Amino acid sequence: MELLIAIVSGFANGVFLRSLFVFSWPPVVFALLLAALFGTAAFLKLRLAYSLGAVFCIFVALGMVRAMLADTPLPDSFAKDLRHRVSYEGVVVSDPDVRDANQRVTIRIASGEESTTMLAIAPRHPSVSVGDHIYVSGTLAVPKPFADDSGRIFRYDKYLQRDGVRFLLNFAYLRVIEEAPWYSLPALLARIKHSFLDGLSATLPEPYASLAGGIVIGGKSGLGKELQNDFIRSGLVQIIVLSGYNVMIVAEWVMAALALTKLSRRWSAAAGAFAILIFVGIAGASATALRAALMAFIALYARASARTYTAGRALLLVVLLMLLWNPLYLVFDPGFGLSVAATAGLIWLTPIIELFLRIKNAFWKSAIATTLAAQVSVLPLLLYDTGNLSLVALPANLLTMTLVPLAMGFSALAGFAGMLFGAIAPFIGILLAFPAYLATKTLLFIAHESAALPFAAFTLPLFPFWLVLFAYAILIYLASSKRFSTTPQLRLEKKASI
């Protein structure tokens, strides 16, 4: 376990440093020199600390190199047309983000030997779909960082670059040249998603249909600003966006269902992995969903091979794989950091919190401990990113934690009922969707009433990053010391991991 921590923390530190500071090879060489010094010390006097220090410094250097490789310049054939009205042909690569006044369409465009991805801000009509071959024209620009009302700088350019988007097309005009071919898998998954959302609209009124869609596959545009603010103020915003929690619920459902079949352990795990992959593809492969999907894959592999599944090792391995794939996730994707912090809190802080809770009921003791662990672990990052401090987040999450899985199941039933019966027997679809209506209505009630309480939430001034580091240093200290010195069971866990 110590070796894996040294590898992942070293790589993440290297990526972090290169993401914040633009430099070339001297720091990489310095890190390798430190690794050589630690390696020499370990050779002369064998100590675990020296060996881990050498491994840490090597992976710091590797993390810097990986971040340097991701920091590519703008393609010349497109950059020369900045601030000019241009026109291209391209392919829609992700589901359009349809808003009240416009739609934002991600388009893959090739020009000569170079290609790039652009975000077109266009009117809501005509509508386009994933895989469509389109003509687009607009004013070419590059995304810029900006400051919010409280003075926080948001690196919008890097946030888009993490998905490969390097340019904006403002005041864009779209025209479909050719619809997506029938054999396009991304187009098929997008059509399934929209058929499901149409099924929800056929069986549920607004805003319950939009909330049901957000609970199952993410998306909050139909809720409106007022309801979105209610979920933010009440600390329940993770319910209405695609998060790792959604994916983990689906994974648990799949594994529970497959446990009732006569399939072998390996075939059950393979079927479960395939179902999770399809769900993530339909819902949208965000960094958070991919992380949770990878965690679920590791759990399924452990089940198929009868090997012990250690959540902490799995999380570290997933973080390493995702940063290898895209180092921009670490600094420039707030959802990725919050998701990793919440999962780490559930793994390492929950046992500590349970030790201090004097609650006899096992269910409520576990519920309060997991909710507190998740809230505490994400709070420093949340304050740094947004400044939002919700004082009602804990009771609101406790009220909804058992309701969300039920709401997901009922909403999935409502969507499929609308797809099957919406046109031929709408009454049957509405009847089957009634449990989803009750569940989403209850969630909306909890979010609205908790957000309306006096002093429910505050927006704090700028939260310095050194306080974030200090807060996580304290949490890491607690997780590494108190966790291993409180109960014999936890001490045995430490011995087994060494």
Image: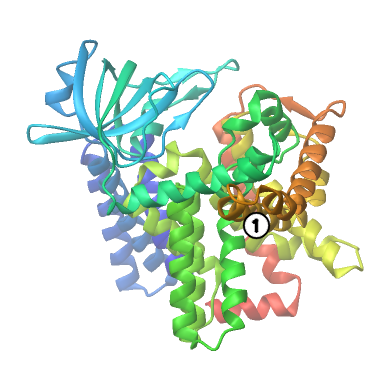
Residue 267 higher or lower than 460, as above or below: below
96 shown above or below 422? above
Residue 114 occupies which quadrant of the picture?
Answer: top left
Callout 1 crowding tier (Cα within 10 Å): few <14, some 14–19, many ≥20: many
> Which residue is drawn at the image coordinates 77% and 38% (left, top)?
444
Extreme residue in the front direction? 424
Asked whether 112 or 347 is in front, the reply is 112
Q: Is residue 463 above or below residue 353?
A: above
Q: Is residue 476 visible?
A: no
In this rendering, would 297 be left or right of 229? left
The colour scheme applied to this rendered structure is rainbow
Q: Residue 14 at what x, y percent from top left?
A: 35, 47
Image height of 439 relative to 73, above or below = below
Type of amino acid at the residue the image marks with label 1: Leu
Q: Residue 418: x, y in percent?
A: 61, 50
Mark 1: which secondary structure?
helix
Rendered image quadrant of residue 57:
bottom left
> Which residue is more in the foreground, 14 or 178?
178
- Which residue corresponds to the image point at 35% horizontal and 63% vertical from the top-left? 55
Residue 222 placement, left or right of 270: right
Q: Which x, y percent locates residue 474?
A: 65, 49
Q: Is residue 175 visible?
A: yes
Residue that badge 1 annotates: 413
